[in-house]
Image: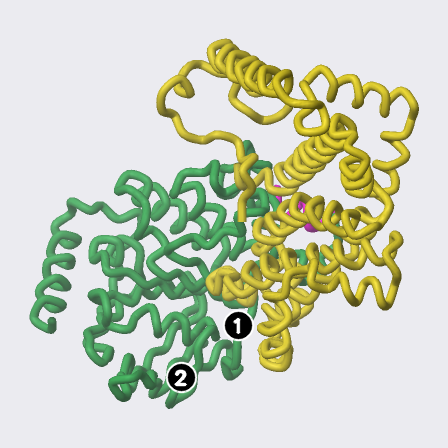
Amino acid sequence: MRDHNDAAITIDGVSKQYEGEGGTTTALREISLSVSSGEFVTVLGPSGCGKTTLLRLVSGLESPTDGDITVEGKLVQGPDPNRGTVFQAYHLFPWLTVRENVAFGLVEQGVPDAERQDRVQEMLEVIGLSNFADAYPKELSGGMKQRVGLARALAVDPDILLMDEPFGSVDMQTRRQLQHELIHIWRDTDKTVLFVTHDIEEAVALSDRIVVMSGTPGCVQATVSVAESRPRNRSAQWFVDQVETLFERIKSNT
Amino acid sequence: MATEFDPVADSSGIRSQPTTTTAFGREWNLTRLWYGFVGTAGFLAVWWAGGREVPSYLLPTPGEVAGALWAELVSGELLVHLGESLLHYIPGVAVGIVAGGLLGIGMGWSLVIDAALTPVVRVLRPIPPLAWIVFAIIWLGLGHTGAAFIVFIGAFWITFYNAYEGVESTSRDLIEVATTLGVDSNRRLLWRVVIPDALPGILTGVRTSVGQCWMMVIAAELFGAPGVGYEIITSANNLAMARSIAYMLVISVVFLLSDWAVRRVRSYLLDWQQ
């Protein structure tokens, strides 16, 4: 069994406000949340509830207006490769090949050439794109692009994986496949995953714990644990019931 | 900014027929080739008919021009004058592209440099390069250095503008990705994200500079710097119009060659785009 005792991510009373022309908008209010080491936690909520903002705060791309976010006991003060981030729109570097995209973080860390190549090759095998190592992103399908996005984040071996609706731009078949692969990678590598989605089924299929958010301003509305073993059968009664319960919960709050 | 020599990209009319790509990157097929031949023959016929009616000092015939071109080629004079032009064109373009590119990247990236230099740039940039010819003459004389200076100014502003736009419009998203992957200095960010992202724009600037600067060369030479342009004006002054046109054609050929070369370099560097 995993050790879920030590907190990998602690979000403590975090609020986020934006100053705009029409005054101050509160995107997040008083969010508190703790993610244990090795845990797979999904933040589930409708569009505009601030779940992406929350993820950006954890990644360090933005700073909270109030409250603190600590990762492995250290206050988050900016982006760090130890918190690998995967974006919905992939954001691959178009001028780099698949291999070079995956190697990006390793180059920045000054990993020696031979070691870097081995690591990239390993990652390409994990995502099943060894044959596309020298292709440019524009030659790839959406699903392949996101595999590269995932491999790029994983290449530097971060403890934490932050995923912002990573499978939101691919078709249903591919989405299922990628979810399946993600669970395998997560199990094999023992990462802590904070995953953001508005897809209830996806949340139930993947997570140890689901944090339901509602807007606006975004706040945590409920936390649901899912103890069933993976892979989870989506037509099982508990699965259908869980999806329905979450659906009702979200609906009653929007 | 594109030039008029962009490869044809639409699929209407006869262009939709099966094609093969040539070394010049154009779509070619027999029909196109045939129409091109007819058009060229028609043009030459009209020129020839016109030239036959008037004295040669008003309009020489195609044959006379071809003769003059051959004579210049055989005597070696053509290469000498082309060499003179290149002697100020190449350094002017090269230094202008590098300096303009660097300033454009610097201003596009740094808000401080941008704020400090914007007023000066706003005022100086609209001045046509040729207006600087008075300074070229006073400071440097109208030899190679003076002409190179004019070319430099042309290449400088064109490349500056494209580099500035390219860097300023760098994808915020890619910068964010880079920071999550461990890029933590301006130097690394410029090198790994900003410049590659701006490269298409910068290379458009380079291509435009290489083309436009042939105009600067000729203009500077009409004022007296040695080279192809000087030969165009002196031949005309002597009413040797066939020789004048021969040198005009030389400009056209070197323009096409240099544009083709830049396009090759560009498509090599930007193969990730095609």
Residue sitting at x 48%, y 14%:
B35
Viewer-proximal residue among B185 and B261? B261
Question: Mark 1 — residue?
Answer: A79
Q: Which residues are magenta?
A: A114-121
Question: What percent of the width, then of the height, locates residue A195?
Answer: 35, 62
Question: Mark 2 — residue?
Answer: A64
Residue sitting at x 28%, y 38%:
A173
Q: Amino acid at mark 2?
A: Pro
Q: Can residue B247 be seen in this snapshot?
A: yes
Viewer-proximal residue among A206 and B30? B30
Viewer-proximal residue among A194 and A184? A194
Pinpoint the chain carrying mark 2. Answer: A
Image check: B234 left or right of B58?
right
- Occupied quadrant, residue B67: top right
Viewer-proximal residue among B212 and A96? B212
Residue B173 magenta-drawn? Answer: no
Secondary structure of the residue carrying numbered label 2: loop
The picture's colour for chain A is green
